[in-house]
């Protein structure tokens, strides 16, 4: 009897429900190995996820990683293995190179392309990793199609990134008057531009709205200083990281729109899961989840790094508040069709059951 073996850098809280589905469906046939901290120190493992701990050893100022631990006992076993599609993980190369000649199934899972796109220099290294693998599992259907066109000989699967199960999706039933805030959920890192957001919001104080910032990271200090210097404490609320589902659902329910001032990631499907449209920076190296955005349907775009255009779009959203508020059920229903943890887990379950 084969097992599904997954080796991850970390198991963050946003993956908890996904791994839970795999454990529920596969039982003892699923084994998960993970370290504690990611390349980015702000991303850490969630202790509620059932896993075997391994040791992440970072090299050259955290540019490379080697993982030590009991997962090496899986090296030559005839199980289905899934590892990260990240060329910076040296130990993953060893698994790929040694297992391939023996015909052992090893799949890589992650971003199809580097953040700078398919024409970047490191895309070739990522492709080499895919050639050693039995197949690639992407984060989006769009990236699956792109890879199939560029590399028709590779086996490509997709597991669209999701945060919630189907039953959890949908917003709280609040009145339109209660949905008045602007919400940002994500790490406070420079690439996501949370400081730009606060500075732009500073120009919107005439609107009957507050800015809610959910998350932590190295930009937090700069934001705190700006808020204090400009006396924005009553209008800008920094909650820190929130993992409580019900609290997040309540914060989204009280928000008319969510925002992504820098590149967008999983927060887009999170927002849509609760029926809240998103205002997005147009020209960014977005994560694959951007495929969920449909302009004039569930998303509005503003000119990147342009505070005036950001403010203009926010003012338009509040001017047509009723239109945006009435889209909430439709947005959540559409998200439910494509981005649930059940759908995300399905390709992994099939991998094992088709190879038993």
Image (tube, grey):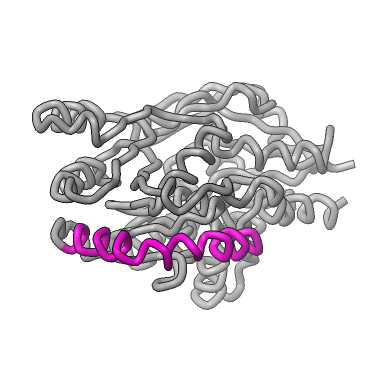
* Residue 136 visible from this viewpoint: no
Q: Position of residue 131 (x, y in %)?
A: 56, 60
Taking the magenta stretch, the answer to whether it contains residue 169 is: no
- Which residue sits at x=52%, y=56%? 275
Q: Position of residue 355 (x, y in %)?
A: 83, 54
Give the farthest residue toward the left: 229
Q: Position of residue 46 (x, y in %)?
A: 56, 26
- Which residue sits at x=53%, y=41%? 249
What quarter of the picture does the N terminus occupy?
Answer: top right
* Residue 228 visible from this viewpoint: yes
Give the farthest residue toward the right: 1
- Which residue sits at x=65%, y=53%? 340
Query: Is residue 129 or residue 320 the one in the foreground?
Result: 320
- Left or right: 150 in relation to 6: left
Taking the magenta stretch, the answer to whether it contains residue 322 is: yes
Q: Main secondary structure of the magenta part?
A: helix
- Which residue sits at x=50%, y=64%? 326
- Left or right: 213 in relation to 221: right
Count of numbered labels shown in the rendering: 0
Q: Position of residue 292 (x, y in %)?
A: 50, 64
The span shown in magenta is: 309-338
Which picture quadrant has residue 39? top left
Q: Eyeballing the image, is 14 above or below 34? A: below
- Left or right: 118 in relation to 165: left
């Amino acid at each position: 009897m084969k097992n599904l073996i997954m080796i991850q850098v970390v198991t963050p809280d946003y993956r908890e429900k996904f791994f839970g589905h795999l454990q529920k469906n596969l039982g003892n046939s699923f084994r998960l190995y993970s370290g504690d901290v990611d390349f980015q120190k702000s991303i850490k493992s969630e202790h509620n996820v059932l896993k075997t701990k391994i040791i992440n050893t970072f090299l050259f100022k955290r540019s490379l990683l080697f993982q030590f631990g009991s997962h090496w006992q899986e090296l030559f076993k005839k199980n289905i293995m899934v590892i990260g599609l990240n060329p910076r993980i040296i130990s993953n190369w060893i698994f790929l190179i040694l297992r391939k000649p023996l015909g052992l199934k090893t799949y890589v899972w992650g971003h199809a392309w580097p953040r700078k796109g398919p024409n970047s220099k490191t895309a070739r290294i990522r492709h080499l990793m895919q050639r050693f693998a039995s197949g690639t599992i992407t984060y989006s259907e769009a990236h699956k199609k792109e890879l199939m066109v560029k590399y028709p000989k590779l086996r490509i699967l997709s597991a669209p990134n999701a945060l919630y199960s189907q039953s959890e999706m949908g917003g709280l039933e609040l009145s339109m008057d209660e949905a008045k805030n602007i919400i940002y959920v994500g790490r406070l890192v420079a690439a996501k531009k949370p400081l730009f957001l606060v500075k732009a919001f500073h120009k919107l104080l005439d609107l009957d709205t507050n800015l809610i910032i959910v998350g932590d990271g190295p930009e937090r200090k700069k934001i705190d200083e700006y808020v204090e210097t400009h006396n924005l404490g009553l209008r800008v609320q920094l909650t820190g990281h929130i993992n409580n589902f019900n609290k997040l659902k309540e914060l989204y329910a009280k928000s008319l729109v969510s925002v992504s001032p820098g590149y967008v990631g999983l927060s887009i499907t999170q927002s849509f899961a609760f029926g809240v449209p998103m205002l997005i920076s147009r020209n960014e190296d977005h994560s694959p989840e951007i495929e969920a955005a449909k302009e004039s349907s569930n998303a509005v775009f503003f000119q990147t790094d342009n505070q005036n255009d950001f403010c203009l779009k926010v003012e338009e959203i509040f001017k047509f508040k009723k239109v945006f508020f009435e889209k909430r059920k439709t947005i959540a229903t559409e998200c439910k069709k494509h981005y649930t943890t059940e759908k995300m887990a399905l390709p992994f379950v099939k991998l094992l059951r088709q190879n038993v």
